Image (spheres, helix red, strand yellow):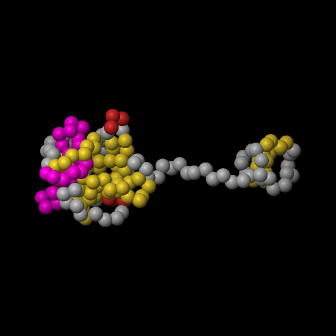
Amino acid sequence: DEGHYYYLRNVWFGKYAAYDSAYDILAPKDKGNGDHYLWQVVKRPGGAVYLINKATGTAAYPATHNGDQAIKLGEEYAWTLEERTLDGQTGICILDQGSTGSWYTNPNSWQYVLLKPFWGACTWEFQKSDVKVETGIAPIVNESTEGVTYDLHGRRVGRLTQPGVYIRGGKKIVK
């Protein structure tokens, strides 16, 4: 659902979620509240997605495609999401474009989320939040304008004292 933000929680290390650290590197952090924990999933052609952090408004990408590289923020990158069961735990793997690596975390060994071949802690849960993605499009408010008169600049006018063209109830009035 592109209309909501998600928490990306690691299935193996359940209390940890992907968090935008101060250095634009994803870090595993105790799941909390706040925009740094929230992710927008933007669908791309061919089934890929961009993962965009709410706090920064920037997308996640791999620093390089070599093993054990940090996942950073700042460049659009097309990830693939695939449900997998690894070592008995089912979750979503966030795959790189070659499908050879996935987001991985082990907070006991690394202080960041990294790209790693599939195993164990490469499985994530996308927990839908109550926070909706703002589209910038506001709903139209249907106000009754019957009996209200406007000039051609859209300003309300009281009595028609000046000659000109006016609009009232969707009809043109010439004075």
Can you give x and y, in whole percent of width and height, for residue 109 in the image? 12, 58
Tell me if residue 132 comes above or below residue 79 in the rendering: below
Dividing the picture into quadrants, the one containing residue 166 is top right
Relative side of 58 to 175, left or right: left
Can you give x and y, in whole percent of width and height, for residue 137 in the image? 53, 48
44 drawn magenta: no
Tell me if residue 75 comes above or below residue 54 in the rendering: above
Q: Residue furthest front?
A: 88
Q: Find the magenta span and give its range.
A: 87-113
Can you give x and y, in whole percent of width and height, for residue 174 in the image? 85, 42
| Between 1 and 64, the one nearer to me in the picture | 1
Can you give x and y, in whole percent of width and height, for residue 88 in the image? 15, 52
**Residue 27 visible in the snapshot:** no
Q: Residue at x 13, y 61 (%)?
A: 108
Relative side of 156 to 162, left or right: left
**Residue 170 visible in the snapshot:** yes
Q: Residue at x 34, y 64 (%)?
A: 33
| Between 85 and 82, the one nearer to me in the picture | 85
| Between 65 and 90, the one nearer to me in the picture | 90
109 drawn magenta: yes
Helix, strand or loop for the magenta stretch, by majority: loop
Q: Residue at x 79, y 43 (%)?
A: 171
Relative side of 58 to 133, left or right: left
Relative side of 23 to 38, left or right: left
